[in-house]
Image (cartoon, rainbow, N blue to C red):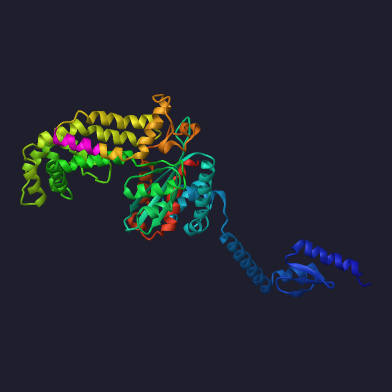
Amino acid sequence: MPKDKTSNYSRLRHFVSEFGDEVFSIGASILFCKLCECKVNSDKKFNVTQHLKTDKHLKAIKREQNKIEKKQQLLTNIPQKCTFNIDLCKTLISANIPLNKLSIVKFRQFLEKYTKNHIPDESTLRKLYVDDIYKETIEKIRSQVANNRIWVSIDETTDVKGRFIANVIIGTLEIEHSGSIFLFHSEQLEKTNFSTITRQCTIIFIRRGTMHEKAGKSLKVFYSKMLHVTCAAHGLHRIAEQVRDHFSTVDKVIANCKKVFKKAPTRVEIFKIEAPGICLPPDPILTRWGSWINVAIYYCENLSAVRGVIEKLDEDDAVSIKKTKKYIVKPGIESNLAYIKSNFTILVEGINKLQTKSLSLITALKIIEDIEKSFKSLRGEAGTIVKNKFKTVFENNNGLTSLKRISKILSGEEENSELDGDLEELTSDDIVFFKYSPITSVDVERSFSTYKSLLTDNRRNFKFENLAKHLIIQCNSDNFE
């Protein structure tokens, strides 16, 4: 008796259930192999299992597995913006570790071993994560400064590639403590003058120089409450430069002596033998505030030892030795060095104090006042020149004069003072927020140090657009933990 249709279908369903619907399907009362794309004899289970062992079916299985692996590979290659990748990218940029370090096998293996995560390719982070982290940083800065009174510091520099770079630091003014400070923008300028600076600036303006004063006046039209304050620390540095110009013999000793021991290991060894326990003559960095006076203080304290070493060197070996021998025995060199250390150490100390973070306005202005009081006792030609320079530098800083008035109001020295002149647009509530107002551009100078560390010799091909993003992420990393 022939089998009925229902029992035949049940048998076929049993085969599909047993071997999987990804292998077999039922169609028109037949068993169909999906992999081999052919009909399979299903009269007996033996026929079905025989088909599964055929070479044709085994090759079909292999082809299917290859297809699955390719799909999985494609899915793996599709970048996923996971939290680990975001944190990894932030960490590398914040620590100034180039993203291409991820291509180092040992480094990747270390990270994979201890994080138990798949480490993305550097291109994945660069293309898909850096821009998002930069935008997130900017948005966080906006939210932090929103509805707050702010100060802005702008400075420009020229990098190793000859580009004019301007950085914009923005900070909040708080009543009870110093506010948050952010690097908000970095821009490549066509040239550095007041018009290019003006296009970038907003509220309170801290910098030095004629072009910045012009920019400040231009912006005052749009921001009536803005005060333009030139950097007080740089003002002290300009006075230190005046000291250097006046004491030309000391400057020649410093300039030539540093060359004597530069890239000269034999002379360095002689110095160590002849002057044990004394460090080599320091090299003044003229762009670093007050560094020349620090070097002059070194020579005041160690002139005899340095002179003894120089006398033992052969002047025919180098021009610098010959010149140093000439100037280091000049009459008056000792008295000049003593005068510099006695009267201008306070300049260096003042510059260092002004670079301290979280200074109140009253404390910062007290540092300037103490230097001014100290200079009143100066006598002689050098004293007159320095006092005149101090007067010129700080009397022309109108914004600082306004801050002095605000400081006196806050300290109670001027109880009945009228808010006139530059202060006429300010309210009594505005005045309170100046308690921790900065008077230096030291924060923007720090951002340039970070910029310099980013643009190393092996990263000169960094496009400025990408370099600016890395700089802003790195400089603000401590603000958003």
The answer to which quarter of the image holds residue 408 is top left
Q: Position of residue 161 (x, y in %)?
A: 32, 59
469 relative to 311, above or below: below
Using residue 33 as the reference point, say whether residue 173 is left or right of it. left
At x 21% / y 34%, what residue is drawn? 344
What span is in magenta? 380-390
Q: Residue 52 versus residue 221: which sits nearer the camera?
A: 221
Q: Position of residue 203 (x, y in %)?
A: 45, 44
Q: Residue 267 versus residue 467: which sits nearer the camera?
A: 467
At x 53% / y 48%, what residue is drawn? 139
Q: In the rendered image, which quarter contains the N terminus?
A: bottom right
Q: Residue 441 versus residue 357: which sits nearer the camera?
A: 441
89 relative to 36, above or below: above
Q: Does residue 332 show up?
A: yes
The answer to which quarter of the image holds residue 289 is top left
Q: Position of residue 41 (x, y in %)?
A: 79, 73
14 relative to 468, above or below: below
Count of number-bearing discs: 0
At x 48% / y 59%, what residue is drawn? 123
Residue 316 among those drawn in magenta: no
Q: Position of residue 167 (x, y in %)?
A: 40, 49
Most extreme residue toward the right, as rendered? 1
The answer to which quarter of the image holds residue 436 is top left
Q: Does residue 95 show up?
A: no
What predominant SS class does the magenta segment belong to?
Answer: helix
